[in-house]
Image (cartoon, grey):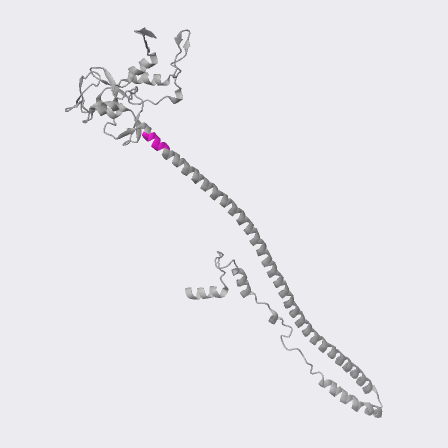
Amino acid sequence: MDIQTGQVTHQPSPRESLESQLSCPICLEMFQKPVVILPCQHNLCRGCASDLYDSRNPYHYSGGIFRCPTCRFEVVLDRHGVYGLQRNLLVENIIDIYKQQPESGGREVGGNVADPPLKDKDTKEPMCTEHEDERINIYCVTCQTPTCSMCKVFGQHKDCEVSPLQSIYDTQKAELRNAVDLLAAGNSCVQAVMAQMEDTCKSIEENSQLQKRRLGESFDLLYAILEERKGQLLEKITQEEERKLGLLRSLVERYTEQLQASINLKEKASQTMEKGNAAEFLISGKELIAQAKEAAKGSNLERPEPGFENMEHLTLCTEDVEVILYQMGFGLGDDDDDVVTEEEEEEEEEEEE
């Protein structure tokens, strides 16, 4: 603090002095991409230089000439315009270091200001591969890649359309955020579909077990019907067997009685013929003759018709049923191959011939 003529004069701090040295004379803000106006060596922001070069600016003259706003020195620009002016990398680096310092300007250690904190390596800005001293600070819209200002002015991107890096960063970050949201929504949809498929798998297993049980019950019913029908048909065969056996056994019994009577009559006749007395023979002979003739007539026996023992008329025909059973399926959509009957095979053979 200096005392002059009774007034208190504010002594600017080193930080304020440094800020004044690093401020643009046009926008009065700290330099943004400072450029050097040769040969007067004064600095100003590139954006302010572009505005200064604009035709509406009073410092602009035709023919690519404009005056330095600090010293009014006339600067002649080439075909690149303000982008042809050399950038002041030293000032730019000083501004970067200055912005990293705390507002208090540093902590005094042993009478000296403490060293500024080192910049984190993870947050270090990437540098251009073509211009090692240039930071990547713009985005080439044409080539869809980040680059530096020197590549735009003199390098491979000089004919390309560029845009501020922050603007493209904000746009692509928003697009990526939307893409992540869409991806999350898609993942949720996939998870929902997978859960639905798992439920469907469980339903398929349950329905499959249900249909297997129903199929078993259906075949058990068919087995029961077949067993019942088998018993009925076996009963018919048994009845036919008993009828024929009964008929034959009755004939055999009758013929046995007739045979026994005939044997007795024969013995009686033989005994009568052995008698020597004619009168005694004639008394019983006439009756025996009549009985023998009557018994002889009975020799014309009743016999069963040829084939009476045959039981072929009780043969079960199951071909049609077998075809139906083989064709038995689950409806119109059944994928099983159709069973070809013998008649169909014969018809196909005739057609081929």
Residue 148 within the segment the image draws in magenta? no
In this rendering, does residue 146 appear at all? yes
Provide residue 4's location: percent of width, then percent of height: 30, 6
Provide residue 55's location: percent of width, then percent of height: 18, 27
The quarter in which the N terminus is drawn is top left
Which contiguous range is marked in magenta?
167-173
Would you place residue 274 above or below residue 145 in this image?
below
Provide residue 154's location: percent of width, then percent of height: 23, 24
Residue 285 horizontal side relative to residue 129, left or right = right
Front position in the image: 235 or 253: 235
Would you place residue 283 above or below residue 176 in this image?
below
Could you tell me which residue is drawn at 84 percent across and 93 percent down?
Answer: 279
Front position in the image: 220 or 193: 193
Q: Quadrant of residue 290?
A: bottom right
Could you tell me which residue is drawn at 31 percent across and 28 percent down?
Answer: 165
Q: Quadrant of residue 51?
A: top left
Would you place residue 271 above or below residue 318 in this image?
below
Query: Is the stretch drawn in magenta largely helix, strand or loop?
Result: helix
In this rendering, does residue 155 appear at all? no
Residue 144 horizontal side relative to residue 193, left or right = left
Residue 169 within the segment the image draws in magenta? yes
Provide residue 323's location: percent of width, then percent of height: 53, 63
Front position in the image: 145 or 344: 145
